[in-house]
Amino acid sequence: MESDKVFAGPVPQVYDRYLGPILFQPYAELLAGRLDATDQTILETAAGTGIVTRALASAWPASSLVATDLNQAMLDVAAARLADGRVTWRQADAQALPFADSTFDVVVSSFGVMFMPDKQAAYREAQRVLKPGRRFIFTVWDRIDANPLMAIADETVAGLFPEDPPHFLARTPCGYHDKARIERDLREAGFRSVTIEEARTQGAVADATHPATGCCQGSPLRGEIEARDPNGLMRATDATAAAITARFGAGPFHAPMQALVVTAA
């Protein structure tokens, strides 16, 4: 759905504040750890609010980094969080990158591929801008039942609208986890070496209201809720917080998460 790609209005700030530390920071550090000293020129696609960008800039101070995203509102939050001369922020579509062939040592993308309608186009573009023999490293969420915070939010909000249940979280963030499909898409786009690893970790949650607020108000699920009930955002958030509390407690607690780390060359 076209609305699945919309991160605007208050969404970027809520996303960065409430989902960033819980869902994305652990995998940002994991991705940064996959690079090495030969990765002097880094391209990040779907950089969002710069969570991975900050991890990359910290881990690899000798490298230059171009961080791109389709949504300028997300990049505005990212640029405000990180003022670093080594980082260039640029609005760009990962399916049609504005860079010359063989420009970068590595292309990185964290939880962005799932939002791209033409994934093979994005893969072909990543391959095109990479120097020969270099790597494209990205993460996608595994199935939703391996990610209980999102699963609880998806089930709870769907239950509030049984006649037209919104399933953004299951449909898009957790909708591209078939390893065979991912490998096939990459190979058909021209990559010859593909490895896919399951990466399990835990998200540190200070308060159950944080992931509830992040999922309901800091993602395109917000638009799905408001389309069904213009005044229903807090009702959905409160119900999700209650369901998370019933599973894990009010907080603090750790919630399991699972993603796939894909390396193509």
Image: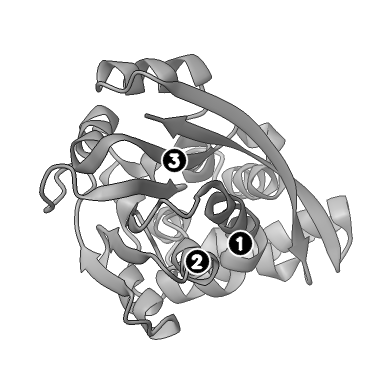
Which three-letter amino acid code belongs to the residue tagged 1?
Gln
CB within 8 Å, label 1 to label 3: no
- Residue position for label 2: 51
Image coordinates of residue 155 in percent, x first then y, are 65, 42
Image coordinates of residue 10 in percent, x first then y, are 41, 76
Q: State the quadrant of the C terminus.
A: top left
Q: Residue 25 bears which disc, if any?
A: 1
Q: Nearer the viewer, residue 200 or 72?
A: 200
Image coordinates of residue 252 in percent, x first then y, are 86, 68
Q: Place residue 82 in its image quadrant.
A: bottom left
Distance of label 1 from label 2 (alpha carbons): 7 Å
Helix, strand or loop for disc 1: helix
Q: Is residue 119 left or right of residue 248?
A: left
Helix, strand or loop for disc 2: helix
CB within 8 Å, label 2 to label 3: no
Distance of label 2 from label 3 (alpha carbons): 16 Å
Q: Earlier in the sequence, mark 1 or mark 2?
A: 1
Position above or below: 60 against 101 = below
Q: Residue 158 bears which disc, if any?
A: none
Which three-letter amino acid code belongs to the residue tagged 3?
Ile
Residue at the spot 13% in from the left edge and 52% down from the top edge: 99
Question: For the residue carrying disc 1, how many other residues have a C-alpha within 10 Å: few (<14), some (14-19), or many (20+)?
Answer: some
Q: Is residue 242 left or right of residue 4?
A: right
Distance of label 1 from label 3 (alpha carbons): 16 Å
Q: Is residue 96 left or right of residue 242?
A: left
- Residue position for label 3: 137
Q: Is residue 245 left or right of residue 133?
A: right
Q: Closer to the camera: disc 1 or disc 3?
A: 3
Position above or below: 197 against 73 = above
